[in-house]
Image: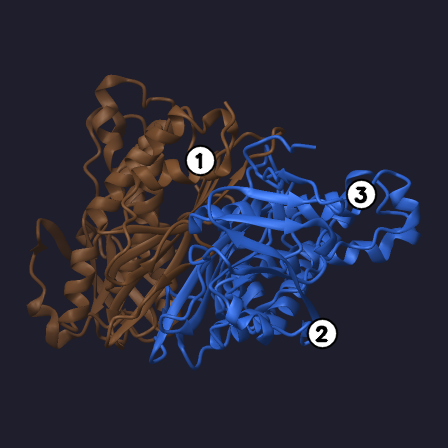
Chain colours: A brown, B blue
């Protein structure tokens, strides 16, 4: 099938929430979007790619999942700053043969994420994939607002702060392993795919922590705890120490544990859970509840002077925790 | 070669202007950028893709050209609104084997465009191309500011307005044809590649027209006059009439005219010149000079009631001008 670019844009506009109004003065259809600042607010801006054969596989990821997840994972960067989500721009590369039914299904998933996350589409760009490589590529820019000066950075953790994580770690990686091992088509494992397909984004928790000034530093766990905690510590010029027995690991079902899926390994190095990693000064620890709106908050260690991250195992042994999560430009370390 | 993602980001940060300060409160290295609104300003936001084998060819476009042009063409959307350029975000997909020398040269070109256009890098995302398709992809989000309510839209042209264009039309297309016909390697044609390689972006002109409130509607000519004027007229619910003899066509050298390169065809349907197309009420026409800072401004026709665009040829014949410029999702009409 072959449709005009203007028609394609109209198709996107019809399916994704994109009405002008409020801060969005001018949306899709002009050269650029016009957004009007809210008083006493900072804009929080991030972008994220979601590419076929890199971040998803056409055979294993239904189009609804592609649309949902592409937008959700981009928005996680806003949650990580404690921002409220506002707008997004979608750059889409698509082969003509998937600009019909596949696109509609992808947009359905994206519209669902936009509704849940409170995002409106403000603009974008479309291109046709070259015939030599008819693959899908999405690049999403998300824009949010935070109260002026309140956005939470990675770089403000201090020695003595407690380290917290939200949610269960490794659940999304478990889903990915089911796909990589070809088990995802078996009905008994279907429900274990959900955290990988439809990650929960912690916008409310991030805003709550920022508003109450409870966290000194924060980021989302997108590339795995070992990598992301390493980055937070490096940005803050501090070290970290975490306790294996405190880490809220995914519960791996018996049949998969027998296949060598290890809970602690998944939790330490598995990416895409999109929980929040944050540090809390000693004096505020008591103000962190066990759960916020149904999401568990777990203290897993503390920030220390020095450099690097150490893992204390159940038997009290301390060893360096190397960043072994997802890095596009390295081989995976496992 | 294989480098870590964090090192890659550091490499980009070192080469592209990205210092925090002014409106940019937090730049590269955190989950998202933080930008503080200027008083009485609107934010103008747009995104644009620049993909290997779609928008450029590795054999014909040196890496410096890729970096320069990717940023320039995205920024043209800010010029089209009458905005001042401020920040950009870069999403980069790159195969490991081009993350060294090729990347450095690309960044050199991009840094040059950033300097010229007044842009600072505020953030981005990197991904490694799949081994099955080791191609480059850039997606750029640009952010500018305009005085509140002054951004110029496509949709406000009125019957009776004069239609103006800036610069010479078809010059970039001439360069593209040299590439597509394999003539670009011949030394005698080298200088004709420049408008295609390094397009001039009309930020100053756009801001001047917006500040003086001289234009009713404006857009950039990225996909060809026939397509872009059609879009402007449709967005404004009006028609257009342009005169072939008034169109400032590229001067095609004799040796290429003999090969069938037609000046009017290039000017009407050739894309990527990135001049501005704007409409001016009758009462303000006298205030438009023949040139603004060295760029010719040419009145080529007028907005009329009704729909569609008509071309009046040199002998006075009127015929519908179909949009035949660049559209990713159609075959090229020629």
**Residue appearing at x 57%, y 32% in the figure:** B330
Q: Position of residue A50 (x, y in %)?
A: 43, 43
Mark 2 nearby-residue class (10 Å; few <14, some 14–19, many ≥20): few
Q: Position of residue A207 (x, y in %)?
A: 18, 63
Write down the chain letter for disc 1: A
Helix, strand or loop at label 1? It is helix
Residue underneath mark 1: A7
Write down the chain letter for disc 2: B
In depth, the one of B292 and A306 nearer the eye is B292
Quarter-wise, where is residue A193 in the image?
top left
Residue underneath mark 3: B262
Residue A8 vertical position relative to residue A213 in the rendered view, above or below: above
Left or right, A48 with respect to A251, comes to: right
Helix, strand or loop at label 3? It is loop
**Residue appearing at x 34%, y 37% in the figure:** A67
Does residue A270 appear in this view? no
Q: Quick one: label 2 or label 3, which is nearer the N terminus?
A: 3
Residue underneath mark 2: B294
């Amino acid at each position: 099938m072959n449709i005009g670019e203007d028609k394609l844009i109209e198709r996107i506009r019809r399916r994704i929430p994109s009405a002008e109004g409020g801060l969005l003065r001018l949306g899709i259809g002009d050269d650029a979007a016009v957004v009007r600042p809210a008083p006493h607010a900072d804009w929080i801006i991030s972008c994220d790619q979601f590419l076929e054969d890199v971040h998803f596989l056409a055979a294993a990821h239904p189009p609804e999942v592609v649309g949902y997840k592409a937008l959700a994972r981009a928005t996680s960067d806003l949650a990580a700053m404690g921002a409220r989500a506002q707008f997004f721009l979608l750059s889409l590369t698509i082969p003509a043969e998937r600009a019909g039914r596949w696109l509609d299904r992808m947009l359905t998933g994206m519209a669902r994420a936009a509704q849940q996350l409170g995002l409106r589409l403000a603009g974008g760009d479309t291109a046709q994939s070259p015939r030599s490589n008819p693959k899908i590529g999405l690049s999403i820019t998300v824009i949010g607002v935070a109260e002026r000066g309140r956005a939470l950075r990675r770089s403000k953790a201090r020695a003595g702060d407690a380290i917290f994580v939200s949610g269960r770690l490794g659940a999304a990686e478990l889903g990915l392993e089911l796909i990589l091992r070809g088990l995802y088509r078996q009905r008994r494992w279907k429900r274990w795919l959900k955290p990988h397909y439809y990650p929960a984004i912690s916008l409310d928790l991030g805003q709550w922590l920022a508003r109450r000034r409870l966290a000194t530093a924060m980021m989302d766990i997108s590339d795995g705890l070992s990598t992301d905690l390493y980055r937070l510590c490096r940005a803050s010029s501090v070290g970290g120490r975490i306790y294996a027995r405190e880490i809220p690991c995914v519960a791996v079902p018996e049949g998969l544990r027998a296949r060598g899926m290890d809970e602690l390994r998944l939790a330490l190095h598995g990416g895409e859970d999109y929980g929040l990693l944050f540090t809390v000064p000693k004096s505020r620890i008591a103000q962190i509840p066990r759960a916020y709106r149904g999401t568990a908050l777990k203290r897993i260690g503390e920030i220390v002077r020095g450099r690097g991250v150490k893992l204390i195992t159940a038997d009290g042994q301390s060893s360096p925790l190397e960043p072994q999560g997802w890095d596009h430009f390295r081989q995976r370390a496992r």
